[in-house]
Image: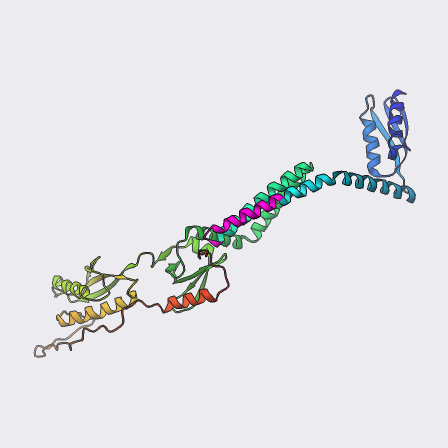
C-alpha cells in the first residue's frame, strides 16, 4: 500500500501522468489509464520499475488519441521549449560572440600569412590556421552550451566522409599533395630547362594538378604532379656549365696521341668551349678497321647555346683532322691504287658556321605564356 501511495502521489504531480492508475500485488505493479505520448508511457514504466520492492511492472497504458489531448500536449511541449530557449538566449548570444571573436582572430592570422612567398603554402597555411582558430571557438561555445557531444559527432562524421572522399578522389588528392611537396622542395623554377621522366622542355608553371613544360618544339606538355614527384628529374639550368660528348673514328694506323692533341687544341681555340674544365679525349675501343675516340668539352649555357656549340665543335674537329691528314675510315672495303695520290681536302674557313650565342627564343615564349595564363603558378614568388 505504501508503494501504491508513493507512485500515485508522484504521478498526480506530473501533468502528463496524472491519469495513470496504480495497483500493486506481491511486488507486481499494474499501470492503467492513458497518457499523451509514448515518451510519457516510457517514463511512467521506468519510474515504477526503479522503486524498491517492485519485481515487475504490468503496463496497460494507452496513448490518448483524442485531438484536443494531442493538441494540448503538443502546445505544452512547445511552450516549454520556447521558455527554455528564452532562458538560454543569453548563453546563445555569448556563444555566438565567442565564435565571432575567434573568426576575427583567424582572419587576422590569415592576413599575416600573406607574407609567405609561395602562394600554395600561403593558401594552405591560411586555411589551416583559420580552421583551427574557428574550431577552437566552436569548441568553447559548445562547451558553454553543454553541447560538446555535437562537436564530437560532427568531427567523427567528417572523418568518415573524408576517408570516403579520399578513396573516391585518390588521384586528385595525390596530385595535390605532390604539388605541395614540389612547392616546398622547388626542384625547378620557371624558365629552367629540365628533363622529367624522359620528357624534356622548359618549365612554364606548377599548378595544383600538373606541371606545365614547353618542349623544345614549342609545344605545351602537362605532367601530373604525382608523376613528376616520383620521376627522375634532370635540371640542366642549375649548373650553367654542361658537358657535351661526341665520338670520332680514326684509322688503326694513325698516331692516336697526335690525333688527340689536334682535337684538344682545336677545342681550346674555339669560341664557346670552356678552358676550365678543359676539353679532353678518351680512347673508347679498338675495332678491326677503326679506333673510336670520345671527345669531351664544356659549355657555359648562360652565354652560349649547348646544341650550337656541340655542332660547331664537331665541324671544326672534322676540318682539323682532315687538314692534319688523319684517316677517318668508314666500314667498307677500300681498294687503294699505288699510282693515285690522295687528294688534300679543300681549305675551310675558320669563320664559325653558326652563331654560338645562347638562344632565348623559347625563353620568350615561356614568358609570354606565363603572362597570358590565368592559372596560379605555385613556383612564383609573391609580390
Write the residue at 44% across / 60% down.
205
Residue at 14% across / 63% down in the picture? 261
The answer to whether residue 128 shows anywhere in this view is: no
| Residue 317: image location, x then y, percent | 19, 68
**On screen, residue 229 above or below 92:** below
Locate residue 337, reporting x and y percent. 10, 77
Q: From the viewer's perspective, tell me whether residue 81 is left or right of residue 208.
A: right
Q: Main secondary structure of the magenta part?
A: helix
Quadrant of the drawing holding the C terminus = bottom left
Q: How many marks?
A: 0
Q: Give the extent of the magenta segment.
A: 101-119
Q: Is residue 117 magenta?
A: yes
Give the residue at x 34% y 59%. 237
For residue 342, say whether it is visible.
yes
Using the image, determine if residue 46 lies above or below residue 377.
above
Q: Nearer the viewer, residue 55 or 86?
A: 86
> What residue is drawn where x is 60% and y is 43%?
135
Task: Tell me where residue 6 appears, x and y as whole percent.
Answer: 87, 23
Residue 52, image quadrant: top right
Quadrant that contains the N terminus: top right
Amino acid at each position: 500500500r505504501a508503494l501504491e501511495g508513493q507512485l500515485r502521489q508522484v504521478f498526480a504531480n506530473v501533468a502528463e501522468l496524472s491519469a495513470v492508475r496504480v495497483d500493486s500485488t506481491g511486488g507486481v505493479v499494474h499501470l492503467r489509464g492513458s497518457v499523451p505520448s509514448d515518451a510519457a508511457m516510457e517514463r511512467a514504466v521506468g519510474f515504477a520499475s526503479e522503486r524498491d520492492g517492485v519485481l515487475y511492472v504490468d503496463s496497460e497504458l494507452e496513448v490518448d488519441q483524442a485531438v484536443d489531448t494531442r493538441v494540448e500536449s503538443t502546445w505544452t511541449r512547445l511552450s516549454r521549449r520556447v521558455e527554455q530557449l528564452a532562458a538560454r538566449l543569453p548563453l546563445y548570444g555569448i556563444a555566438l560572440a565567442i565564435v565571432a571573436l575567434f573568426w576575427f582572430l583567424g582572419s587576422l592570422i590569415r592576413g599575416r600569412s600573406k607574407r609567405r612567398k609561395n602562394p600554395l603554402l600561403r593558401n594552405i597555411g591560411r586555411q589551416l590556421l583559420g580552421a583551427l582558430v574557428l574550431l577552437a571557438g566552436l569548441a568553447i561555445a559548445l562547451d558553454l552550451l553543454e553541447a560538446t557531444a555535437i562537436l564530437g559527432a560532427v568531427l567523427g562524421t567528417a572523418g568518415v566522409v573524408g576517408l570516403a572522399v579520399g578513396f573516391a578522389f585518390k588521384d586528385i588528392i595525390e596530385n595535390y599533395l605532390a604539388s605541395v611537396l614540389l612547392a616546398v622542395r622547388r626542384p625547378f623554377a620557371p624558365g629552367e630547362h629540365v628533363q622529367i621522366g624522359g620528357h624534356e622542355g622548359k618549365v612554364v608553371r606548377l599548378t595544383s594538378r600538373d606541371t606545365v613544360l614547353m618542349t623544345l618544339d614549342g609545344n605545351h606538355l602537362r605532367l601530373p604532379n604525382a608523376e613528376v614527384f616520383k620521376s627522375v628529374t634532370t635540371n640542366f639550368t642549375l649548373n650553367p656549365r654542361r658537358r657535351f660528348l661526341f665520338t670520332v673514328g680514326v684509322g688503326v694506323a694513325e698516331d692516336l696521341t697526335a690525333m688527340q692533341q689536334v682535337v684538344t687544341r682545336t677545342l681550346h681555340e674555339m669560341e664557346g668551349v670552356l678552358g676550365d674544365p678543359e676539353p679532353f679525349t678518351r680512347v673508347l675501343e679498338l675495332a678491326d678497321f677503326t679506333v673510336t675516340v670520345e671527345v669531351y668539352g664544356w659549355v657555359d649555357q648562360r652565354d652560349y647555346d649547348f646544341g650550337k656549340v656541340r655542332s660547331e665543335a664537331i665541324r671544326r674537329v672534322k676540318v682539323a683532322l682532315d687538314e692534319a691528314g688523319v684517316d677517318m675510315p668508314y666500314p667498307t672495303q677500300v681498294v687503294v691504287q699505288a699510282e693515285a695520290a690522295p687528294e688534300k681536302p679543300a681549305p675551310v674557313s675558320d669563320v664559325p658556321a653558326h652563331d654560338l650565342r645562347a638562344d632565348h627564343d623559347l625563353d620568350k615564349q615561356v614568358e609570354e605564356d606565363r603572362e597570358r595564363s590565368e592559372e596560379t603558378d605555385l613556383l612564383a614568388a609573391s609580390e
